[in-house]
Image: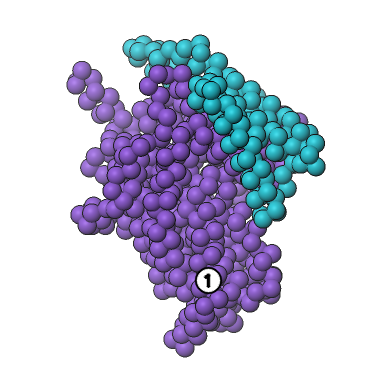
């Protein structure tokens, strides 16, 4: 519902250079109204339905997801500067630790797998398929 | 005609051309199977190699890449629940549950066989009635297009899962994301929040990677703390074959999905990304056991895989007969024609009939190469499942990041995959289905373009949407589809309540 209202009102900020009747805000506005109505219906349905409640997610699970997201965000922010090989190695390594539930004993093998695959992928895609991957500080 | 046909076949039948088809198909399968890489990318990367080739040889390579790429998508869709291509989105719904139940071999075998048959069906249609079908396709007005797309969107009811309202809301959310960037027709920039990289809107590939691959990584991160969390996706793959009874039991499903795939392929712009979802929904609606869809049944793999390959032959019809590309890949193929000094269109049938039959032959050989290669390496694909999840998923994430960067040659799309990954993770927690969102996102720009084009033609009147016969039929079908879904949903709720 909230999103519907937001889209509806922000559609008035869309500049139009065509006939006002069927401008580029026509469909967004229609979709916003439909979202508002359906959102209202969903609130009503949920209100009337018996509250079964979603299974609670543990704090540790939330932490795991947050670390995963943060590692990807750091990757996206630094790949241009640091470069594909280093950042991808780090991202893969962190993700391996998270998904294996922090099995530190295997850290060395994870690091070797991460580094070798990053290098292999980099050379395969940049040298064979001519994709422009960020070189960063190694460039 | 027969002389042209024979000459066309002979031109393709050289050792060099057959090797090009096989190499193209193999590379295409690889690009299709790896999440993040697409057939369009494979064709774009190999296009410079065709500069020094004869037109028939270059077509052999490119068609192999196209067909292999579309077919390869089923491998990761079934094994990893990450669609390799947009055409294999619906394959994940039943293909992956089959894999987790230890039937990965059966799902892959069925997908490969029916991909082959679906491709063959559409190539036959292309061979027999291409010019006539192209003439019909060109007469479809924006009013008809709008109504066809609207009808496709109402079919999301079939993909909505437990709640129809949540399914429709998810579809509307997908439409909202399609509004971001430059508007169709007048190019007005909207909803970009001042971010320049969004002026062109969200690119489909990073969106799909985010919704399917990144969300799966987040889910695995969440599940990792559970003591009983599986370390592999599945350890049992079952028999790598389907029985004769299972094969013949899919006849009606196959024919229906082939027709849907071919028709959608013919309609320029809609393409394989939509055909698999519509074929899946149609199979589910006409099934005697619709509730089994999504739990891992063969019908749910056969329908999308038949339709996405049938869309290939369908997409070639407007390409060859009218010079209109049906999707991104056929748009690049037009470029390949032009590099060789040939303009596809109605005149191609009179000026280059031999070339046309060479293309048809290349399609058939590539289809055969596809089934042989995929069945040959089937056991190899399945071995992917032996890799522990914590090694496999980060590896896939790495390739997805490459795919996201390569889609537009910019790092910005890594933020996009992250955004959509978080979105998919969150909405599934609140039981909102992801497929309607994808459908809304894919069809949104086409819906808006044809709505606005129609309104411009009619000077603002909505009457032609109801007076054009095809458009009127589609609008009636859309209303009926919603009514039936609501009725079926209510019956289901009552059945559950009575059961309790």
Instruction: Say which element carries label 1.
Output: helix
Q: In this view, does A82 lie to the left or right of B421?
A: right
Q: Which residue is drawn at the image coordinates 35% and 58% (left, top)?
A: B113
> Which color has been applied to chain B in this rendered view?
purple
Q: Along the line of sight, which residue is nearer the eye, B274 or B62?
A: B62
Q: In this view, does B171 lie to the left or right of B113?
A: right
Quadrant (top left/top right/bottom left/bottom right) for the C terminus of chain B: top left
> In x, y percent, where is residue A77?
72, 29
> In x, y percent, where is residue B122?
41, 64
> In x, y percent, where is residue A7?
62, 27
Q: Which residue is drawn at the image coordinates 59% and 20% (left, top)?
A: A67
Badge 1 is on which residue?
B19
How many badges with numbers are in the image?
1
**Which chain gets the cyan colouring?**
A
On the question of residue B441 being in view, the answer is no
Q: Quadrant of residue A46?
A: top left
On the question of residue A136 being in view, the answer is yes
| Relative vertical location of residue A40 with respect to residue A16 in this rendering, above or below | above
Q: Which residue is drawn at the image coordinates 55% and 70% (left, top)?
A: B20
Q: Quadrant of residue B297?
A: top left
Q: How is the image coloured?
A: by chain
Subunit that carries the residue with mark 1: B
């Amino acid at each position: 519902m909230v999103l519907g209202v937001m889209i509806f009102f922000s559609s008035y900020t869309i500049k139009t250079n065509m006939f006002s009747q069927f401008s580029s805000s026509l469909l967004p506005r229609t979709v916003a109204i439909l979202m508002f109505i359906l959102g209202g219906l969903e609130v009503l349905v949920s209100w009337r339905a018996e509250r079964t409640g979603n299974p609670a997610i543990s704090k540790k699970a939330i932490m795991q997801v947050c670390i995963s997201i943060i590692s990807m965000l750091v990757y996206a922010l630094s790949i241009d500067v640091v470069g594909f090989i280093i950042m991808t190695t780090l991202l893969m390594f962190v993700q391996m630790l998270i998904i294996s539930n922090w099995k530190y004993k295997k850290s060395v093998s994870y690091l070797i797998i991460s580094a070798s695959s990053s290098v292999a992928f980099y050379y395969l895609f940049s040298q064979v398929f001519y994709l422009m991957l960020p070189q960063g500080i190694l460039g | 005609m027969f002389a042209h046909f024979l000459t066309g076949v002979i031109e393709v039948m050289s050792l060099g051309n057959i090797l090009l088809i096989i190499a193209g198909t193999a590379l295409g399968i690889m690009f299709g199977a790896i999440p993040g890489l697409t057939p369009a990318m494979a064709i774009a990367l190999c296009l410079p190699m065709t500069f020094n080739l004869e037109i028939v040889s270059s077509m052999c390579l490119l068609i192999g890449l196209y067909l292999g790429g579309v077919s390869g998508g089923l491998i990761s869709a079934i094994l990893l629940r990450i669609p390799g291509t947009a055409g294999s989105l619906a394959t994940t719904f039943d293909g992956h549950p089959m894999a987790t139940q230890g039937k990965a071999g059966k799902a892959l075998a069925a997908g490969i066989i029916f991909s082959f048959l679906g491709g063959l069906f559409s190539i036959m249609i292309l061979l027999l009635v291409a010019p006539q079908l192209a003439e019909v396709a060109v007469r479809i007005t924006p009013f008809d297009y709008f109504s066809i797309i609207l009808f496709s969107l109402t079919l999301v009811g079939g993909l909505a899962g437990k709640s129809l309202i949540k399914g429709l809301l998810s579809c509307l959310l997908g439409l909202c994301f399609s509004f971001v960037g430059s508007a169709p027709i007048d190019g007005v920039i909207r909803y970009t929040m001042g971010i320049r990289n969004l002026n062109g809107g969200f690119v489909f590939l990073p969106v799909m990677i985010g919704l399917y691959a990144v969300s799966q990584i987040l889910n695995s991160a969440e599940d990792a703390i559970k003591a009983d969390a599986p370390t592999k996706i599945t350890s049992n793959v079952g028999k790598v074959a389907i029985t004769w009874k299972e094969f013949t039991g899919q006849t009606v499903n196959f024919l229906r999905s082939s027709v849907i795939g071919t028709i959608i392929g013919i309609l320029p712009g809609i393409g394989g990304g939509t055909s698999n979802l519509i074929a899946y929904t149609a199979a589910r609606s006409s099934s005697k056991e619709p509730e089994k869809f999504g739990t891992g049944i063969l019908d749910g793999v056969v329908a999308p895989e038949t339709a996405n390959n049938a869309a290939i032959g369908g997409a070639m019809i407007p390409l060859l007969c009218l010079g209109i590309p049906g999707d991104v890949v056929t748009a690049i193929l037009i470029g390949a024609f032009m590099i060789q000094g040939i303009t596809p269109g109605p005149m191609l049938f009179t000026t280059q009939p031999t070339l046309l039959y060479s293309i048809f032959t290349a399609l058939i050989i590539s289809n055969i190469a596809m089934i042989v290669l995929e069945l040959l390496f089937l056991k190899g694909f399945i071995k992917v499942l032996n890799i522990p999840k914590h090694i496999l998923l980060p590896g896939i994430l790495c390739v997805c990041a490459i795919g996201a960067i390569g889609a537009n040659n910019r790092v910005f799309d890594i933020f996009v995959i992250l955004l959509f990954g978080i979105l998919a993770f969150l909405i599934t927690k609140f039981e909102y289905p992801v497929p309607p969102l994808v459908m809304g996102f894919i069809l949104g720009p086409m819906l808006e373009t044809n709505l606005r084009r129609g309104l411009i033609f009619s000077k603002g009147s909505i009457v032609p949407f109801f007076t054009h016969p095809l458009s009127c039929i589609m609008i009636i079908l859309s209303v009926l589809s919603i009514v039936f879904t609501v009725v079926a949903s209510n019956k289901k709720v009552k059945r559950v309540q009575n059961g309790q």
